Image (tube, rainbow, N blue to C red):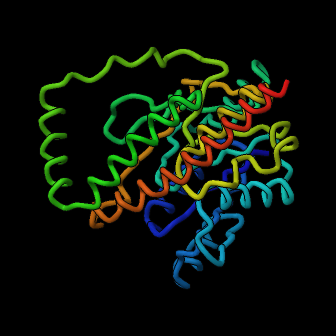
Amino acid sequence: MHVFVVLHYKNIEETLNCINSVRQIYGNKKIIVVDNASLTKEEKKELKNKVDCLFVMDENIGFAKANNYGIKQAMALYNPEFISVINNDTLILEREWINKVQKIYDETSFDVLGPYIESFKGSGSVNPYTPLANIEQVDKELSYQHKLLKIYQHAGLYFLLQIYMKIKHLFIPRKIMMNKEQRMDNVALHGCALIFSRKYLQKYPDAFCSKTFLYHEEDFLYLRMLKDNIKMVYEPDIKIIHKEGQSLKGLKIRPKLLWKTKEIIKSLNLLRNEYEEILNERTKN
């Protein structure tokens, strides 16, 4: 048994497209949708007819908590061998997804598996994810996000930033990416599509760190890998498309960026606390 947990928020069309792509996958599967308090009555009725289980939260509890809830329900209802947790703005075109995941597990005995994640613009895989691997990197990112926050708070500075970014993309070449066509062990994985094995979920009922609301869940998962020696594997033989940013269409961008940056800073401060605890433990020992 393989369960797919899809987190829904506001964009019903994307969620339905995601569900339809999962329905095309061969094998024994169930689909669970967790809604972060955004569905209308009509949308609830429509989704109930499309999925095996629909859970509607009373309020928006964020990415980690909502996915953890869906995962726990999946384990209680079906006790599956694997749970694929995917964003609603993703499409799975790989019909052999379930068979390939089982084959990869037989070869690697992974705790967490990450697929090749193709961006909607076709710029290559965002996996493996580049983590903030120590407290110095977290502090550097915090400093950068605080600078961005000041810019987003002022319309004039934000306008100048937009001009700068356009010029930068015209004249500065893109960085050469690592080879992402081969399997990699013990790497950080992007949070928009993760496959958890039963043995991992039996050890960690909360698959994600529930302290965060949104952003940098991948870094907490990577930190768990380092601390507890869990096996995280990147496998390019299974592919998914991520339409990141599509849900922002029609929204006023600057207020959205302000909110996003504030949430990122909150998550980074939590991550910094985690690294501080590790350093304090090492000092005591």
| Residue at image point 60% right, 17% down | 183
| Residue at image point 19% right, 47% down | 161
| Residue at image point 86% right, 50% down | 79
Q: How many marks?
A: 0
Front-lying residue, 127 or 144: 144
Tell me where residue 13 appears, x and y as whole percent. 43, 65
Front-lying residue, 60 or 96: 60
Front-lying residue, 101 or 143: 143
Tell me where residue 209 appears, x and y as whole percent. 69, 48
Which of the image's four quarters has the C terminus? top right
Residue 263 relative to residue 28: left or right: left
Which of the image's four quarters has the N terminus? top right
- For this orientation, the residue located farthest to the front is 284
Q: Is residue 177 above or below residue 238?
A: above
| Quadrant assignment, res 275 | top right
Residue 158 relative to residue 78: left or right: left
Front-lying residue, 178 or 264: 264
Residue 249 relative to residue 113: left or right: left
| Residue at image point 72% right, 50% down | 3
| Quadrant assignment, res 216 | top right
Tell me where residue 249 appears, x and y as whole percent. 30, 61
Tell me where residue 52 appears, x and y as whole percent. 71, 64
- For this orientation, the residue located farthest to the bottom is 41
